[in-house]
């Protein structure tokens, strides 16, 4: 399992989202996992976040405790 490098996350956040103050830290983390670690699987992203202490707190804050809820969160802005 991948361990989240929070120092690299901070650099990613500062360089990519410096002008976007409205961006949520959780959304930035998901973007970081996709771009820095090249993770494309929703399950792998969820598992990585869920295995990390800080990541787990982010999930709990959003009341996400299973993959289905995480998928709903990821695709919340998509209209079918």
Image: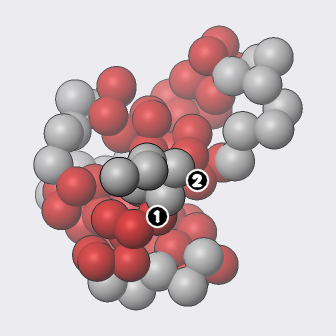
Q: In this view, does 68 lie to the left or right of 30?
A: left
- Please say if 79 is above or below 55: above
User: Could you say which quadrant of the image residue 54 lies in?
Assistant: bottom right
User: In the image, 37: left or right of 49?
Assistant: left
Q: Nearer the viewer, mark 1 or mark 2?
A: 1
> Helix, strand, or loop for circle 2?
helix
Secondary structure type for disc 1: helix
* Residue 5 appearing in the image: no
Residue at 69% over, 47% down: 24
Residue situated in front as seen by the camera: 74 or 63: 74
**Could you tell me residue 52's position as x and y percent?**
41, 66
Question: Mark 2 highlights which residue?
Answer: 26
Farthest residue, direction front: 80
- Colour basis: secondary structure
Residue 5 image offset from top left, x and y in percent:
43, 41
- Label 1 – label 2 distance at C-alpha: 11 Å
Tell me: residue 30, above or below residue 13. below
Q: In which quarter of the image is the N terminus?
A: bottom left
Determine the residue positioned at 44% across, 34% down. 32
Residue plotted at (51% across, 74% down):
59
When the figure is inspected, residue 30 is found, relative to residue 8, above or below; the finding is below
Residue 67 in sight in this render = yes
Q: Which tag, 1 or 2, sits closer to the chain's start?
A: 2
Name the residue rendered at 56%, 23% in the picture.
Answer: 12
Residue 40 position by quadrant? top left
Residue 73: mark in rendering: 1
Q: Position of residue 27 (x, y in %)?
A: 56, 46
On the rendered structure, is 28 left or right of 48?
right
């Amino acid at each position: 399992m991948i361990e989240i490098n929070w120092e690299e996350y901070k650099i990613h956040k500062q360089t990519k989202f410096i002008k976007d103050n409205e961006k949520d830290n959780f959304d930035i983390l998901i973007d970081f996992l996709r771009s820095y670690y090249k993770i494309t699987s929703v399950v792998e992203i969820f598992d990585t976040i869920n295995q990390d202490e800080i990541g787990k707190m982010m999930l709990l804050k959003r009341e996400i405790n299973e993959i289905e809820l995480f998928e709903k969160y990821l695709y919340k802005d998509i209209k079918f």
